Amino acid sequence: MPQAAAEVLSNSPEFTVSELSSALKRTVEDTYGHVRVRGEISGFRGPHSSGHCYFALKDESAKIEAVIWKGVHGRMRFKPQEGLEVIATGKLTTYPGSSKYQIVIEALEPAGVGALMALMEERKKKLAAEGLFDEARKQLLPWLPQVIGVVTSPTGAVIRDILHRLEDRFPRHVLVWPVRVQGEGSAEQIAAAIDGFNALPEGGSIPRPDLLIVARGGGSLEDLWSFNEEIVVRAAAESMIPLISAVGHETDITLIDFVADKRAPTPTAAAEMAVPVRAELAVEISTLARRAFASWRRSQDARRNELRSAVRALPGVTELLAIPRQRFDRPAERLPRALRANTHIHDRKLAALRGRLTVRTLQSQIQQAKERVARLGMLAQRNAKLLIERRKIRLEHIEQLLDALSYKSVLDRGFALVRDGKGAPLHSAVSVNAGTALKIEFADGTVGATADGDMVKAAPRPKRGGAKRTVPSGQGDLF
């Protein structure tokens, strides 16, 4: 190396590795503080355990590392996915630990319709696998709803078209839940409106809709993207109120169309699906009424003809009564003779009885009856005396038993019954206080007394089989 070149190099400022890395970091960040980069997401495996996302953006010939911090990722409406072409907005920075640069992404959006279509198709497969698009989940629309809830922008032409069409066909009570239909936060507002209508109570101050219409005018795929968001699709799938999706024009397809109970090609068509035409209903009712009246007249005419045919086939009154009259005439001819014969028979029986019925016979029967009554009277008197005697003996036994059990028999043996002033018997000395008025009942009368309060404890009773008996002196012991 020439001596001059060596002197120049030796005079250059000297950096540490950290100083050089910091200088490069400041240069890159100052120069590229805000950039938009288009590329394909590569190496994305979902958020890290820390919540941050690490991947790369690449094109045909280059690749740049990318990072999305946890807080930014949580606020993103459009999330990164592997293989998706996107436009990333952020700033460049360096990572001194590995001597490389990377982009810190602050916003992410799909790059073109192709990317959105791929994302929509992938999301459609995922939701279909969960069964959200099954026909068995779809509800029938009410034939004539009383209240219709509309989720749309309050300022667009959509709500005016729906209201005008309802007014022309069959005016109904309409509740509008105003929402943004595109842009940041629109998906959350649409989902909240669907949930809000379903949360209205039956019979509340705000009537609960019988039918929902989620509507928006036509637009590009990006403009209609809010109706492809999972939060909107799941809210529509969980709606207990039948729902019509009317998003875009006939050729526009969004994911809410697959979960809705009915899809309308336009918002105006949704209003036509919601209610019938009142004038057509009036004509149809009039036609049905005429047909019903004509059918009733035909039925009456047919029954009248059947009745006339049945009348002609029936026999006349004379024919119907001819045989019964014959049967009645024959007994009527025999009746006078039979009455006379019956009278003669009863007269002969009465004469026979009259011959047997004499005064002596009556007297004999009366005498027999008197004797029977006398015998029965004697028998009854004897039985009554026997019963009274038995009752008297039983009463004497009961009286003897009562005397034996009565406390007076105890008084006759020299005992006394002590009562308090109210006449209640006293059972122990503990219940008697000084000055207590007492009544002492003997066998021959009752004496009043007053307790002096001195209680003498009774000597304990000797126990059976206890102390050995002492024999008085001068008397032998039998044992």
Image (tube, helix red, strand yellow):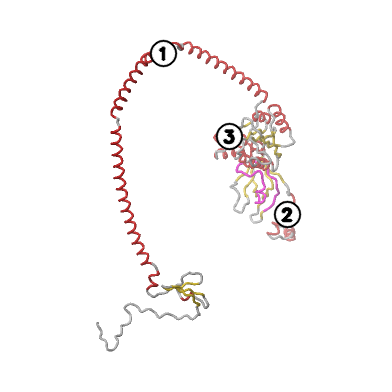
Circle 3: element type: loop
Q: Say which quadrant the N terminus sits in.
A: bottom right
Residue in the picture at 38% in, 72% down = 412
Q: Is residue 136 above or below residue 444?
A: above
For marks 3 and 1, the one nearer the N-term is: 3
Reading the image, the residue beneath label 1 is: 325
**Amino acid type, label 2:** Arg
Tell us which disc is closer to us: 3 or 2: 3
Q: Is residue 463 above or below residue 2?
A: below
Span shown in magenta: 68-94
Q: Residue furthest front?
A: 359
In the image, 231 versus 424, the foreground residue is: 424
Disc on res. 26: 2
Characterize the local packing of mark 3: few (<14), some (14-19) or many (20 or more) Cα atoms within 10 angstroms.
some
Q: CA distance from mark 3 to mark 2?
A: 61 Å
In the image, 64 versus 463, the foreground residue is: 463
Residue 60 in percent (x, y) is at 63, 41
Circle 2: element type: helix
Residue in the picture at 69% in, 60% down = 16
Does the stretch in magenta take in 93?
yes
Residue 416 visible? The answer is yes
For marks 3 and 2, the one nearer the N-term is: 2
Circle 1: element type: helix
Residue 59 visible? The answer is no
Disc on res. 139: 3
Residue 355 in percent (x, y) is at 29, 27
Q: Say which quadrant the C terminus sits in.
A: bottom left
Q: Is residue 299 above or below residue 261?
A: above
